[in-house]
């Protein structure tokens, strides 16, 4: 084989990667319509007509749920806040153990910490890079409450085995499908195989609204709780004593009308975006086959892949150079990327999450090891004073 240009060989391409352009006149017009209306967000943190948002929020949620055939779609201002919302909705409590993947974006595990849940990291499968069911089962204890499954890179996790383990042990399954919009397994969308799941709408994802996310579920109770947590639910439950839920505290995780208007247009483009990515992925899979030491991606039977990223397994011995040199050599064949979306090849995906200081040093919340060292009921004393209102 010829030497790569950085080691003295002849440069091959000098090719400039085209920029990703998926925002067009459709999004611009939709945003202008919202601006003309003057109503940039219609949410109100109190029960009533505006508790669940305005016109564009409702339209986006309806379109999204119809697209993937979900009973409920609940928009949020990021998928990170979506995951946190879900932890609250499924009732994660201090000391609960949540089995997570170590190989994913950090929020897929940190979301549990916000509710005092403790992420327990299982191993991943060799070919899918998603949670390994055998490894999950070994980690189940009486404290285990849920499993957060990630469909990494846009390929489907082993949902059949994971669901059968979860059912056997009475565990709740959350699907982080941030990287897998439009992906189905056995003709059912990801996000709906477990009990609740969702997608990201951040700038780097297939379709986006700058920032944003959407929770999906067929479970009415979880959906109701998510709507509460999205929008100051404490006010709602106070004024609706007949609700089937009580102990809710909410945040402000609301998407704006402008973002919803963009997301509506983006959703229409998803099929085309996936088709195009499939063409590119096929080129890579076919090309990689003839390169000794590289292994392309594997797509699970009865599923499709959204190709958020294209994972390549690298064998330094067979290729004859280190991974770092290989990545540098390939990237040197292209013009320097002007935008971050033009990155060609990177050195792996993320560092395993358990190596993060949060887990190594147990420094998630406060300075005393919470929730890692939580060991049951602690005495909590709530004090309040009579407040005398004075009219000046
Ligand atoms: C992007 C991503 C998230 C976080 O989504 P945001 O919308 O950026 O908050 C979570 N999990 C995975 C797997 C992701 O790729």
Image (cartoon, rainbow, N blue to C red):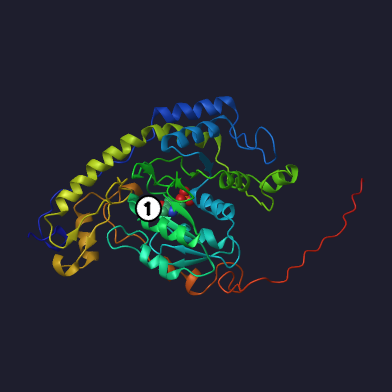
Q: Given the current orientation, which residue lies at the most extreme front position?
A: 168
Q: Is residue 73 above or below residue 36?
A: below
Q: Nearer the viewer, residue 69 or 40?
A: 69
SS at badge 1: loop
Tell me residue 326's x, y (percent).
Answer: 20, 62
Q: Is mark 1 within 8 Å of ligand 1?
A: yes
Q: Given the current orientation, which residue lies at the most extreme left position?
A: 1
Q: Nearer the viewer, residue 184 or 290?
A: 184
Q: Is residue 362 left or right of residue 122?
A: right
Q: Nearer the viewer, residue 329 or 66?
A: 66
Tell me residue 357's x, y (percent).
Answer: 48, 71
Tell me residue 341's x, y (percent).
Answer: 34, 47
**Residue beneath the point at 50% across and 38% down:** 71
The reply to whether residue 320 is visible in this rendering is no
Q: Is residue 63 above or below residue 235?
A: above
Q: Quadrant of the N terminus?
A: bottom left
Q: Is residue 241 left or right of residue 155?
A: right
Residue denoted by label 1: 151
**Residue beneath the point at 41% across and 57% down:** 164
Q: Is residue 117 left or right of residue 282?
A: right
Q: Is residue 241 left or right of residue 296?
A: right
Tell me residue 70's x, y (percent).
Answer: 47, 39
């Amino acid at each position: 084989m010829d030497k790569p240009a950085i080691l003295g060989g002849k440069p091959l391409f000098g090719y400039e990667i085209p920029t990703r352009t998926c925002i067009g006149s459709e999004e611009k017009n939709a945003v202008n319509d919202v601006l003309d209306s003057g109503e940039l967000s219609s949410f109100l943190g109190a029960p009533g007509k505006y508790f669940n948002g305005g016109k564009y929020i409702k339209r986006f949620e309806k379109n999204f749920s119809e697209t993937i055939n979900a009973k409920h779609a609940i928009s949020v201002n990021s998928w990170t806040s979506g995951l946190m919302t879900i932890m609250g909705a499924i009732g994660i409590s201090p000391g609960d153990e949540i089995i997570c993947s170590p190989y994913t974006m950090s929020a897929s595990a940190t979301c549990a910490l916000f509710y005092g849940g403790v992420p327990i990291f299982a191993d991943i499968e060799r070919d899918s890079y998603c949670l390994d069911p055998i490894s999950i089962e070994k980690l189940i204890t009486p404290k285990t409450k849920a499993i957060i499954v990630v469909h990494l890179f846009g390929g489907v996790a082993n949902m059949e085995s994971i669901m059968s383990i979860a059912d056997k042990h009475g565990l709740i399954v959350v699907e982080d499908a941030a990287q897998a919009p439009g992906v189905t397994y056995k003709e059912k969308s990801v996000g709906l195989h477990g009990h609740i799941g969702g997608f990201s709408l951040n700038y780097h994802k297939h379709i986006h609204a700058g920032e944003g996310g959407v929770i999906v579920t067929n479970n009415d109770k979880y959906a109701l709780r998510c709507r509460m947590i999205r929008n100051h639910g404490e006010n709602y439950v106070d004024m609706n004593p007949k609700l089937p839920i009580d102990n809710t505290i909410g945040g402000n995780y609301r998407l704006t009308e402008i973002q919803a208007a963009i997301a509506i247009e983006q959703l229409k483009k998803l099929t085309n975006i996936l088709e195009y990515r499939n063409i590119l992925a096929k080129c890579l899979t076919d090309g990689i086959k003839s390169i000794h030491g590289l292994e392309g991606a594997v797509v699970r039977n009865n599923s499709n892949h959204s190709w958020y990223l294209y994972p390549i397994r690298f064998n330094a011995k067979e290729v004859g150079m280190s991974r770092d040199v290989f990545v540098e050599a390939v990237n040197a064949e292209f013009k320097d990327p002007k935008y971050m979306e033009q990155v060609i090849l990177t050195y792996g995906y993320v560092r395993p999450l358990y190596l993060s200081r949060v887990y190594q040093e147990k420094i998630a919340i406060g300075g005393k090891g919470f929730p890692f060292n939580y060991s049951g009921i602690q005495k909590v004393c709530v004090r309040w004073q009579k407040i005398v209102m004075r009219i000046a």
